[in-house]
Amino acid sequence: MRKLQWGILSTGRIATQFANGLAQSQTGELAAVASRTLDAAKAFAEAHASLPRPFGSYDELLAHPAIEAVYVATPHPMHREWAVAAANAGKHVLCEKPIGMNAHEAAAMIEAARSNGVFLMEAFMYRCHPQTERVLGLIRSGALGTIELVQASFGFQAAYDQKGRLFNPELGGGGILDIGCYPVSFARLIAGTAAEPRPNAPAQNPDRLSATAQLGQTGVDELATATLEFESGLVAQLSCSIRQFHDNRARVFGSEGWIDIPWPWAPAKFGGTSTIHLHRPVRGEPDTVEDLTLETAESLYQIEADHVANHVSQQQSPAMPWDDTLGNMQTLDRWREAIGLRFPADDSAPATR
């Protein structure tokens, strides 16, 4: 079978993780890598068995006719520029999350993909994993009854670096854009499936959003919480932090039971077992807990790469379609607005609501 020819823009940690997953892919292979310097691209290429062709600029990679798909692994503020450039060059695009700095940028990237007839997906790899479908299947089956509450967190403790990506407002620092996007996307997905229990039900945007945050010395959100209220009455309580470790779990509570997902954001990252705990409370008795395990031979990024290859002809991913990406960015904009957090990229963006 002929494999999709991939190029990677940037050579950081996430680019390495994707390249390692792609090396196991049945549908694609890494053919090129680009960095801001040729030496960095050469070092990255030499570290991978496929020996991808190195380029000393992103433009050179995009101009190469053999490259069919591009993984944009640059810092957040560069996503729009290079995803649009890739689409204009006729390349399919997998763009690291968040897809842009705000909903305005997301809309521009979607329009570029639409007008050029290429695939575009925001790289929420957990959306492609079978564990997520298992969770949605439980909700669609009615096993939890009426879904009433979602709790989800993502937090870690980063070493303070005023100029580093996580703390620099010029680079879209803070927790909301970098990792808060995960709990938001999960809550919106659950709300949509609960409202319309069928496969590929559209994610929902909240009717109301309230938030609190602790802004650090550089002005970015180092700790942030949000409460999302949906039309159905479902409430989501979300948190993210780059200063504190969180339990990094998701829980979905219904009228008949609840599920605990110990690691929703990167399940079985290198393949293996992932587990969901299904609780069925009985009044006056201890909970009955059923451990639902799932075995996957493929690594998380391999699954994502194969997912892209299997859907390029559709332009959109059923796991993360364009309306979902745009809705997620709109919700993240609202979260930042609620805590008074703006980035330089927002100054050129028109209002999204």
Image (cartoon, rainbow, N blue to C red):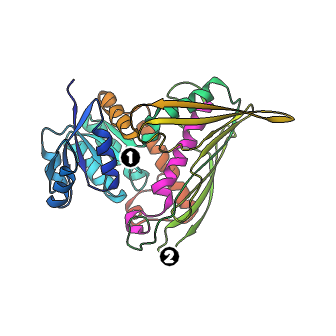
Foreground residue among 277 and 265 = 277
* Residue type indicated by callout 1: Ala
Query: Could you tell which of marks 2 and 1 lies nearer the N-terminus?
Result: 1
Q: The residue under label 2 is which amino acid type? A: Gln
Residue 276 appears in the picture as rendered = yes
Residue at the far bottom in the pictured view: 217
Category of crowding for the residue at label 1, using alpha-carbon neighbours closer than 10 angstroms: few (below 14), some (14–19), many (at least 20): many
Whether residue 314 is visible to the viewer of this picture, yes or no, is no
| Quadrant housing the N terminus | top left
Question: CA gap, disc 2 to disc 1?
Answer: 31 Å
Q: Secondary structure at mark 1?
A: helix
Residue 82: give x, y in percent of width and height: 26, 51
Name the chief secondary structure element in magenta.
Answer: helix
**Which residue is pictured at 59% across the width and 47% down the height?**
249
Which mark identifies residue 107? Answer: 1
Disc 2 element:
loop
Query: Residue 335 falls in which quadrant of the image?
Result: bottom right
The residue stretch that appears in magenta = 167-195
Q: Nearer the viewer, mark 2 or mark 1?
A: 2
Proximity of marks 2 and 1: CB atoms separated by less than 8 Å: no
The quarter holding residue 18 reads: top left
Is 299 positioned to the left or the right of 54 in the image? right
The residue wearing badge 2 is: 217
